[in-house]
Image: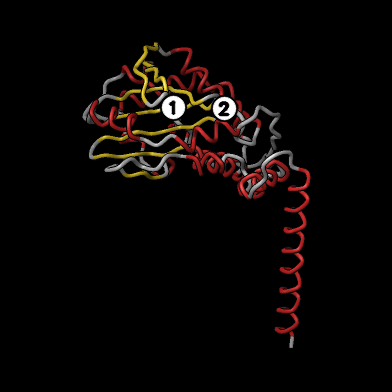
Amino acid sequence: MWVLRALSIAFFVVGIGLLVAVWDYWTQMERAEGEFDTRVYVTTVMDRFGDMGGAMTVALSRSQLVLIALPDAPEGWTAEAYIDTDDNELFSTSQWNASDEILDAAIGHMEPELQRLSQTDHAIFNAYLRNTTRTYRLGDSRIDLYVTDPDKPVAHPVWQRYDQAITNHFDSISDTMPFGMMQGIEWVEHVSALERASNGPLPHELRAFVGYIGDVRLDLITRASDDALNAFLNTTDWSELRDLSAASAPKQVAVVQQSGDVSSSVTPRARSED
């Protein structure tokens, strides 16, 4: 009897949940100005509940819209989550040493507050990283893509400063040179002490490039042949990121704060912080 009672309660709760969801969708559609569809509704849910902290921030991060827009692998290439790859394929021993020095200069002052971050804090950043990065491979060529949409930053004040500090420092210490215009994107090569360090036994040279689609920044970290790099830049379908850029609007993004025990995390060009 208790099983039937539990099932009846469960069905009642699910039914109420569906009614609430339908009502909320209808309410948001009535309030919307202009076109309204499922994608717009999901965005409103992220805006309203994505800054609540903990699991809600991980589950409803606006950066999931970036994940949807990440390009598929061009023909002949494979794609995988960057966060699941091994950066020892990218960086030689000399380059790891250069990375350590650069990161210490960029974020060394943040060490006390980084040490206070909790497992939940790190889960928020790791989810953001998974949503905004991708690794592409062709033979022994590897290209890592990092997408930064200013409308969809990581929903955490410490990680926002951390991410921005690394980007700003690399930009400030890098020499830049025009690389080329491919598919309407102007790519600029960045050369820092990291790229100048010895490549050791690793194939191809470590290189870094920056391009923009509107306000959306694209960072490429590559260890690829010239032919593979040019093929990637000329054949990758950037249309979803163009749509993302067109749909983005500058706004104040709410952030959350957590505290507690230390856990490991990764960030583009900062895996040595694990």
Q: Quadrant of residue 18?
A: bottom right
Q: Which residue is mark 1?
A: 219
For the residues labelled 1 and 2, the Cα–Cα distance comes to 17 Å
Q: Is residue 250 left or right of residue 242?
A: right
Query: Which element is circle 1 on?
Result: strand
Among numbered discs 1 and 2, the one appearing first in the sequence: 2
Q: Position of residue 12 (x, y in %)?
A: 76, 73
Under mark 2, the amino acid is Tyr
- The structure residue drawn at horizontal position 67% and vertical position 49%, both measured from the top left corner, is 56
Under mark 1, the amino acid is Asp
Q: Could you say which disc has been placed on residue 162 in the image?
A: 2
Q: Position of residue 141 (x, y in %)?
A: 26, 35
Q: Is residue 49 left or right of residue 101?
A: right
Q: Position of residue 195 (x, y in %)?
A: 33, 20
Which is more toward the observer, 21 or 141? 21
Q: Residue furthest front?
A: 34
Which class describes the residues within 10 Å of circle 2: few (<14), some (14-19), or many (20+)? some
Which is more toward the observer, 173 or 12? 12
Q: Quadrant of residue 100?
A: top left
- The structure residue drawn at horizontal position 69% and vertical position 32%, both measured from the top left corner, is 253
Q: Quadrant of residue 71?
A: top left
Q: Position of residue 269 (x, y in %)?
A: 43, 29
* Tag 1–tag 2 contact (CB < 8 Å): no
Query: Which element is circle 2 on?
Result: helix
- The structure residue drawn at horizontal position 23% and vertical position 28%, both measured from the top left corner, is 227
Q: Is residue 70 left or right of residue 78?
A: right
- Name the quadrant of the N terminus: bottom right
Which class describes the residues within 10 Å of circle 1: few (<14), some (14-19), or many (20+)? many
Q: Residue furthest bottom?
A: 1
